[in-house]
């Protein structure tokens, strides 16, 4: 492999912008990151693709991922969920490294094929659960694994948005089961389940069984630019209760109808010796309740000794949502250059997919489901 990694990026809208911005920031803020060339931007609509390639700094464009997956060193699969399996598997079979956006796949079966392809490949495969790469979250993980909270009894995560509360909000691919696999469960629930596993998994073990409920509030929406409507075949909201191996109780929910909440991902952990609370709306802060104190203290996680902070600005000069992608890209590309595994791997993302599938099955059956029984 030459020193410069060539990147092919499938998808050029929201995630294409987030990851292209991250790649552009690396040379200035992470000069020890591998050298990367944004080689080819992959999409269907040639005109919008050409404009995006120009803005995002790609050398060329392609309208068929099959033609380029073995030409580049790394494939960024940022397409809609139904496009995660085939291009990623084809790239891994060509020993092209893959960073795939979450959720891994629309279905558990497709996620299993992706996990197996990663196991059989020499390439590095990663799942883009970007919220792991926040200083406050990594600081929280350290507190938990150092035993600062004692035995973990509760894990409580919610991810609240409200972009669909207007019934006239237009139909998009995320609302179709064939294209997305699930609605808010896979889109936002995947983040929360991954974050819970990342934060407490070492001390609680895995989620053993789960009981879930899915709800669709609006079952058809107007097609943009057309007359008529298209059915909504996925969930608008989910809630679930989970039992961890160590006996901890998990409570999870997400909604696209939480009026007034724009991108409110929050998680709280309660243990025998303390608690912590994190909210994406205050992503530089962590609230910590330590044994013997009367209440929570708010820690601004922006010291030079905090993860990634010394790459940016002095203490108190806060970072934002986009920086999670810069950190994630730095770690992924460093793993590729060093020939080391990246976390979260496709196997870890498959574990998340198992929990999502168990929630769907529990909703179908109206009873608790053991994760090991989900196929
Ligand atoms: C959904 O609106 C969404 O864009 C998710 O798909 C992202 O994963 C999340 O980070 C922000 O919200």
Image (cartoon, rainbow, N blue to C red):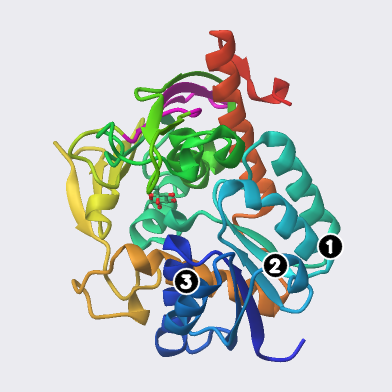
Q: Secondary structure at mark 3?
A: helix
The spot of residue 95 in percent (x, y) is: 81, 69
Of the 4 image quadrants, the one containing the N terminus is bottom right
Q: Vertically, is 117 above or below 149?
A: below
Measure the alpha-carbon separation of dots 3 and 1.
30 Å
The spot of residue 68 in percent (x, y) is: 73, 74
Q: Vertically, is 207 above or below 283?
A: above
Residue 159 located left or right of residue 176: left
**Magenta residues: mostly which secondary structure?**
strand
Q: Secondary structure at mark 1?
A: helix
> Is label 2's Cβ within 8 Å of ligand 1?
no
Q: Which mark is residue 64?
A: 2
For marks 3 and 2 on the same chain, the one whose residue lies earlier in the sequence: 3
Q: Please name the residue that numbered disc 3 is placed on.
A: 48
Of the 4 image quadrants, the one containing the C terminus is top right
Q: Which mark is residue 363?
A: none
Say whether marks 3 and 1 touch (CB < 8 Å): no
User: Residue placed at 56% from the left, 43% from the top?
Assistant: 202
Task: Give the camera-side residue of 86 and 201.
Answer: 86
Q: Secondary structure at mark 2?
A: loop
Residue 68 located left or right of residue 160: right
- Give the residue furthest to the top: 366
Q: Is residue 244 magenta?
A: yes
- Give the residue furthest to the left: 294
Q: Write the start and end of the magenta stretch as one range.
A: 233-256
Say whether marks 3 and 2 touch (CB < 8 Å): no
Q: Which mark is residue 93?
A: 1
Which label sits in the foreground, 2 or 1? Answer: 2
């Amino acid at each position: 492999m030459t020193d410069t990694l060539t990147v092919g990026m499938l998808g050029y809208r929201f995630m294409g912008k987030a990851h292209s911005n991250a790649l552009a920031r690396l040379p200035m803020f992470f000069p020890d990151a591998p050298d990367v060339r944004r080689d080819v931007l992959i999409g269907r609509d040639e005109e919008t693709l050409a404009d995006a390639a120009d803005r995002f700094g790609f050398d060329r464009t392609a309208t068929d991922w099959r033609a380029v997956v073995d030409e580049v060193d790394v494939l960024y699969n940022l397409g809609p969920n139904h496009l995660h399996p085939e291009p990623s598997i084809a790239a891994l079979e060509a020993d092209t490294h893959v960073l795939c956006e979450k959720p891994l796949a629309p279905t558990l079966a497709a996620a299993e094929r992706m996990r197996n392809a990663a196991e059989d490949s020499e390439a590095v495969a990663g799942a883009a659960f970007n919220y792991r790469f926040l200083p406050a979250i990594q600081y929280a993980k350290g507190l938990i694994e150092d035993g600062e909270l004692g035995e973990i009894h509760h894990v409580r995560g919610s991810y609240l948005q409200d972009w669909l509360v207007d019934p006239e909000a237009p139909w998009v691919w995320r609302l179709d089961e064939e294209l997305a696999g699930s609605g808010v469960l896979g889109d936002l629930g995947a983040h929360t389940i991954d974050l819970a596993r990342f934060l407490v998994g070492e001390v609680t073990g895995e989620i053993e069984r789960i009981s879930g409920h899915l709800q669709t509030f609006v079952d058809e929406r107007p097609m943009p630019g057309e007359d008529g409507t298209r059915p909504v075949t996925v969930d608008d909201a989910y809630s679930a209760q989970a039992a961890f191996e160590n006996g901890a109780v998990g409570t999870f929910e997400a909604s696209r109808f939480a009026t007034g909440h724009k991108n409110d991902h929050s998680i709280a952990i309660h243990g025998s010796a303390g608690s912590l609370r994190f909210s994406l709306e205050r992503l530089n802060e962590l609230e910590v309740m330590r044994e013997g104190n009367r209440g929570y203290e708010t820690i601004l996680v922006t010291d030079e000794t905090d993860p990634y902070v010394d790459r940016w600005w002095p203490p108190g000069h806060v970072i934002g949502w986009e920086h999670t992608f810069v950190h994630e890209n730095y770690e992924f590309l460093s793993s590729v250059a060093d020939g080391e595994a990246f976390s979260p791997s496709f196997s870890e993302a498959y574990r998340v997919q198992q929990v999502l599938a168990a929630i769907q099955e529990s909703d179908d059956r109206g009873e608790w489901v053991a994760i090991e029984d989900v196929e």
